[in-house]
Amino acid sequence: MTEIIHLSQLPANLLPALTDLHLATMPTLLTELGKPFVLRYYQLAQADPTVIALVARSTASHPLPSTALPPSSGENDLLGYCLGSPCPSSLTARLRSPAAWFAKHILSATFSHPSVLLQLAQSTLFASKANTLQPGQIELTYIGVAPQARGYGLGTKLLTAFAESAQKTGYTSIALSVETDNLPALALYAKFGFRITQTFTEGRYHRHRMEYRLGT
Ligand SMILES: CC(C)(COP(=O)(O)OP(=O)(O)OC[C@H]1O[C@@H](n2cnc3c(N)ncnc32)[C@H](O)[C@@H]1OP(=O)(O)O)[C@@H](O)C(=O)NCCC(=O)NCCS
């Protein structure tokens, strides 16, 4: 069985497993910064009541193989996640403190991935106004499903739970940015009901801005 739980319900000892899943599925700047940053990001997200984050996990190994269920290798496997916030930049800004922790880990990230500094500079210099949230909007920042669990409807389940939570909290729409060549994600969003509101360039990335109106 697969269940969707809120990140706040995920035991702290499973945050490293969620971090590993994020690293394996989400090739973004946060991933480039490395495991300490991703783990800290989820710790901060877990403690932030404005963040809506959901985790899909397998609750038991399946007694009978079924093509309708994602494969699982054991109990409590984490199979997917999604996370959104009304102010994504404030969540990432909190990664800069405590200053000593940040200095130590950014130095080590720079040594292992020298391109990280350039990407950090580009993300600041080329940040597009297209990403600005409108009143009543929440940003869907990340969504990912483990490679072996894709194509079983988990991405849709996560989006459905995210939309329900966002609507209950009082948001009127969900916004997101997606690279124009990410065809599986674009297909998921389009099938769910997101529509493209803008197409823009941010540094070397070409992105669509998409919106899903809640309660329609
Ligand atoms: C995008 C992602 C979350 C989809 O998860 P998923 O669990 O496979 O999605 P679903 O099974 O719910 O698929 C829903 C619909 O999306 C479309 N879709 C999903 N994957 C697709 C693919 N590889 N090719 C074409 N269409 C696809 C299909 O229309 C599908 O509906 P259908 O199965 O009834 O035809 C997953 O591919 C992923 O984790 N990708 C890497 C992370 C990522 O790119 N995240 C988005 C960043 S913006």
Image (tube, rainbow, N blue to C red):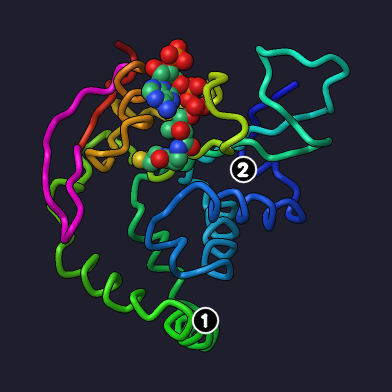
**Callout 1: helix, strand or loop?**
helix
Asked where in the image residue 183 lies, by quadrant, the reply is: top left
Place of residue 20 in the rendered image (x, y in percent of width and height, measured from the top left): 62, 55
Question: Tag on residue 7?
Answer: 2
Q: Could you tell me which residue is drawn at 34 percent across and 25 percent down?
A: 189
Amino acid found under the numbered disc labelled 2: Leu
Q: Closest to the observer: 44 or 156?
A: 156
Q: For the C terminus, give its image quadrant.
A: top left
- For the residues labelled 2 and 1, the Cα–Cα distance comes to 25 Å
Whether the residues at callouts 2 and 1 have beta carbons within 8 Å, the answer is no
Assess disc 2: are there few (<14), some (14-19) or many (≥20) residues with their C-alpha within 10 Å of its C-alpha.
Answer: many
Task: Check residue 137 for magenta coloring.
Answer: no
Sequence-first tag of 2 and 1 = 2
The part of the chain drawn in magenta is 193-208
Residue 160 visible in the shown view: no
The residue at which mark 1 appears reads as: 105
